[in-house]
Amino acid sequence: QARKSGEKDRTSRLVAFHQILNLVNRTHCCCSLYQLQVRWTQNPFLCSPLAPARADAHRKKEQQREMESLAKVFQAIPISAVPPPAGGVLCLSQNSSLLEGASQLFDKKVQSAPVFDPSKMDCPWNEKYVGIVDLIGIVCGVLDACGASDSSHKSFASFLSSKKHLTEKKITDIMGTWQISPFVPLEDKSSLLDAMLLLSKYGVHRLPVVASGGDIVNVITQFSVVNLINQSKDALGVVGKKTLKELGLADKTEVFTLPIHSKTVEAFKMIRDKHVGAVGLTGEHGRLIGTVSARDIRVMVEHPELFGLMEQDLRVFLESARITQPNIMNPAIRCTGDDTLEHVVEVLAGSHVHRIFVVDDKGLPVRVVSLSDVIRQYVSEPEGYFGNYFVHGLPAGRPGL
């Protein structure tokens, strides 16, 4: 009878609904409204064919309201709430050589730095700064030009110094080879919402913050924002309680991996060529057993004894790295689709890594959840927020945010 159309159909469903309520009261069950709604919509005898779609639309509206509420919270937080790097912000002159640039990067223990034109120090920031250079771009560019088979050089510095055709090269000559993060500055009056949208939806990894005088006073990274989320997770709604499966973050996607017996230089080149932050290392039957990340490039430059192992297989490189300094190399941090987003945020913040591998019940990697994936779950762009300032995720000529 409940399937019949018209007033009779409506009356039958109302009667059935009241029968369920009476049953709940008689058995003293604790049943939430959401659970009751799910049971109602999943029973074909108690609802119309359109009820599941209506329930799904209702859930999406609730999620949208929550995202809009969070957007207002983040918009009210100034970008100055994110503390600057402890050692200050490193900026490199475009006149710096490759060796000078690499040396300053690993001396400051940073992966990348903005590049400025020293002849335009008094100009607006969009004329003063010419881009951003990354350590992995320098190292892989040099290895591409020269190869890494010369084992007589025990450090990157001695290797680069021996190549006369590279000693006169400037960092601007290599600046475009590793463009995982374009140069997109924020003005210091911007909000945390601006930063979160750029770091998630638009794929930027690092955001220089420009003061009114044109100097870069901070660099906002994806990790610094995820760390803030971890510190405030109890106040950020229910999204953190959802599992990766519920959020669609456990669906199988392409995961870049290499067998553990591959050459070390192949891992670093894959990171550069695929524009990813790390590659997984697999052992027997394709199970995930480790990882090599872009951060390990800095470790290799900082510890000269590791550079001579670039042509060795990854197992030798990793074992030597752990002997040199046990804490410099991280194992592959993993989770399953049943873990909550809150748990993933806590693991990422606690382990100081930039990604977590989702594995199946056999230990095979099925997906990588990055910092940008995490930030994206907490924020959505209000309609028309950035207007036409970005095209395909890259700057479209806007002179500042």
Image (cartoon, helix red, strand yellow):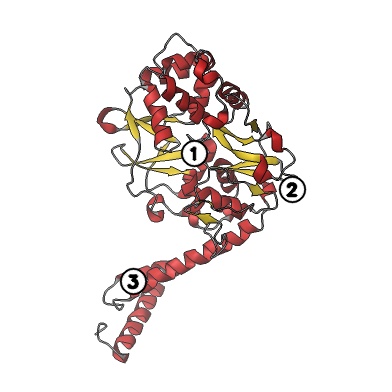
Lateral position of residue 84 relative to residue 279, left or right: right
**Mark 1 neighbour class, 10 Å CA radius: few under 14, some 14 to 19, many 20 or more:** some
Residue 164 image offset from top left, x and y in percent: 51, 15
Residue 52 has which mark? 3
Lateral position of residue 345 relative to residue 130, left or right: left
Q: Which image quarter is the N terminus in?
A: bottom left
Residue sitting at x 31%, y 42%: 360
Give the spatial CA distance, label 1 vs label 3. Answer: 45 Å
Give the spatial CA distance, label 3 vs label 2. Answer: 53 Å
Residue sitting at x 60%, y 46%: 228
Q: Amino acid at mark 3?
A: Pro
Residue 382 has which mark? none
- The one nearer the camera, 50 or 157, is 157
Question: Which of the two labelled residues, at mark 2 and mark 1, occupies the earlier sequence position?
Answer: 1
**Mark 2 neighbour class, 10 Å CA radius: few under 14, some 14 to 19, many 20 or more:** few
Residue 179 has which mark? 1
Residue at the disc numbered 2: 212
Q: Amino acid at mark 2?
A: Ser
Question: Which of the two labelled residues, at mark 3 and mark 2, occupies the earlier sequence position?
Answer: 3
Give the spatial CA distance, label 2 vs label 1. Answer: 27 Å
Residue sitting at x 56%, y 32%: 172
Q: Tell me the element at label 3.
A: helix
Instruction: Confirm or deny contact between disc 1 and disc 3 (CB under 8 A).
Output: no
Q: Is residue 32 visible?
A: no
- The one nearer the camera, 219 or 125, is 125
Q: Tell me the element at label 2.
A: loop
Residue sitting at x 57%, y 27%: 170
Judge depth for marks 3 and 2 and give the one in front.
Answer: 2
Instruction: Confirm or deny contact between disc 2 and disc 1 (CB under 8 A).
Output: no
Lateral position of residue 8 relative to residue 58, left or right: left
**Mark 3 neighbour class, 10 Å CA radius: few under 14, some 14 to 19, many 20 or more:** some
